[in-house]
Image: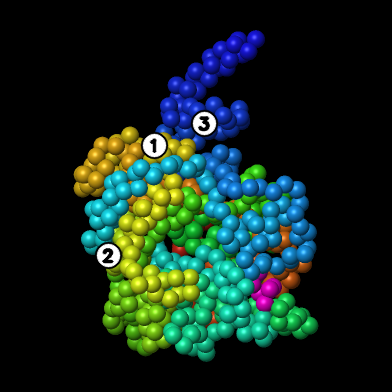
Amino acid sequence: MAPILALLKAVLLLPFNKFIHKDFHDVVERMTLIDKLLFLIIHFVDKLGIWHRLPVFLGLIYLAIRRHLHQEYNLFNVGKTPTGVRFNPTDFPYRTANGEFNDPFNEGVGAEDSFFGRNVLPVDQKDKLLKPNPIGVATKLLSRRKFIDTGKQFNMIAASWIQDGSAIYGNDEKSLKKVRTFKDGKLKISNDGLLLHEDDGRAISGDIRNSWVGVSLLQALFVMEHNAICDALKEEDPELGDEELYLHARLVTSAVIAKIHTIDWTVELLKTDTLLAGMRVNWYGVLGKKFKDTFGHVGGAILSGIVGLKKPENHGVPYSLTEEFTGVYRMHSLLPNNLPLRDIDAPTGPNKSSPLSEEIAISNLIGLDGEKMSLVIGFTRLMVSMGHQACGALELWNYPMWLRDLISQDVDGKERPDRINLPALEIYRDRERSIARYNAFRRAFLFIPISKWEDLTDDGEAIKTLEEVYGNDVEELDLLVGLMAEKKIKGFAISETAFILFLLMATRFFTNNFNEETYTKKGLEWVNTTESLKDAVVRHHPEMINKWMNSSSAFSVWDSPSNAPNPIPLCLRIPQ
């Protein structure tokens, strides 16, 4: 009987296998029937290369299918997984110093010193760590020739974005205590709006290692946000003490950062109607913000978004960021060579632009030198200058040269005696950490692999140089180089291959614990009424927005036009 069933199965799969790219036969064989059908849908669309040109609602369906398949087949645990409930979540109503006790089934999930997970099974490259030589690859394909920017889409504030609350608070008890005043729950900040500094010039903040003034400015802004939240919470409930105010404000500030990252920063990074809709669906669901604000979270993630779900969903694999996520988040090409400083005392020009006064090398704005320079320039002038400066494009030959001879720092922000070649090091790190090279990476994420350099790029010079470095073997292409060389979707500042890994994986503090009991009524209201970085800036520096920002988003170049109203409902729009 078994041979007959096997034969019948082979006959039924024959039409599938003829249509499906040969590299996917094995993975499709392991899928459920429903997943096979879903894969056929995205595979058909991928062959046509049209998902980003589909009407928005169809594009969202494509992305929802992809997300489901990647959650099923691209999450791999690293390390041991405890079974059964390990602790009572009510015993840990706040985020702990080192990230422990986030998941009731595994107290170590996402904590300091926990493993990075995997989206792709490790690919042993011990015999190819230096093939081709990382320094040669960086020199021939990455090193900046002439600065290429992103136009009006993405500015230097976007390039400095801090991503999560650990940059403000730190990752251990020592760091958390260092930044606190221990009065009314507040954090340390100077009267001029900048971070305070140690006697040796190091900034007092959660994470200062290998930092620069762009990050320091955002750290200072969110210290002010934290302190303002403390004031609001204390006004609502004067009985709250220092510790309670601090812990509640830390939760609220972290949620604000996550929300800004989801529906503002990512939307500007992937500036299309489809991704605007997708990011808002992530947070609010298809029913939208007004419905959710009025009736609360109704139904599952599709109707009301991930935030406020009854419980977090880890798809059977303990939550973690992954080695592959680290690999696609290498974005140092966003940094330009220089930051043109604006004259904030002069009258503004068209679209609230300020005249240039001088340029300062970005290499002078990193580390201890950068902190000293920030004290001279001041918060407002630095912020306005960064807001009006486009960041670099993520393309070949646009990696800053000064990062090839960089003084790195230890965990305490102290300079090390050695220098590093950062682009070469990043290529080497991917190989050392067994991250798949570009084509294998695409294959693992169910993207049709390239078979020749022309599939990757239309740039003749790039093709010639790729052949010079890698020969005709497209399988040897390093991930970082491939991501920079890949043809970009219109509106995308990153490659399609990198984008697909930007999955929002939730914790209980954004799901079943996203409530008034955990955040307080005022804290939850604070998160729900913050829609963008612009909202945070206007709370603390209203004059900055009124005088110098014309753009709709604080992450766009500030003198760019505001987004024009569009009467067509978002999900019914057709990308241009």
CB-based contact (under 8 Å), mark 1 and mark 2: no
Start-end of magenta stretch: 246-251
Where disc 2 sits, the SS reads helix
Type of amino acid under label 3: Val
Mark 2 packing: few (<14 Cα in 10 Å), some, or many (20+)?
A: many
Vertical placement of 517 versus 273: above or below? Answer: below
Vertical placement of 288 versus 222: above or below? Answer: above
Type of amino acid under label 1: Pro
CB-based contact (under 8 Å), mark 1 and mark 3: no
Picture quadrant of residue 410: bottom left
Residue sitting at x 68%, y 84%: 184
Across and down, in percent, residue 204 comes to 51, 80
The residue to which callout 2 is attached is 401
- Residue 27 circle label: 3
Vertical placement of 148 versus 209: above or below? Answer: above
CB-based contact (under 8 Å), mark 2 and mark 3: no
Measure how far apart labels 1 and 3 are at the Cα level.
14 Å
Picture quadrant of residue 223: bottom right
Q: Is residue 116 magenta?
A: no
Measure how far apart labels 2 and 3 are at the Cα level.
41 Å
The residue to which callout 1 is attached is 449
Pointer 1 or 2: first along the chain? 2
Picture quadrant of residue 460: top left
Mark 3 packing: few (<14 Cα in 10 Å), some, or many (20+)?
A: few
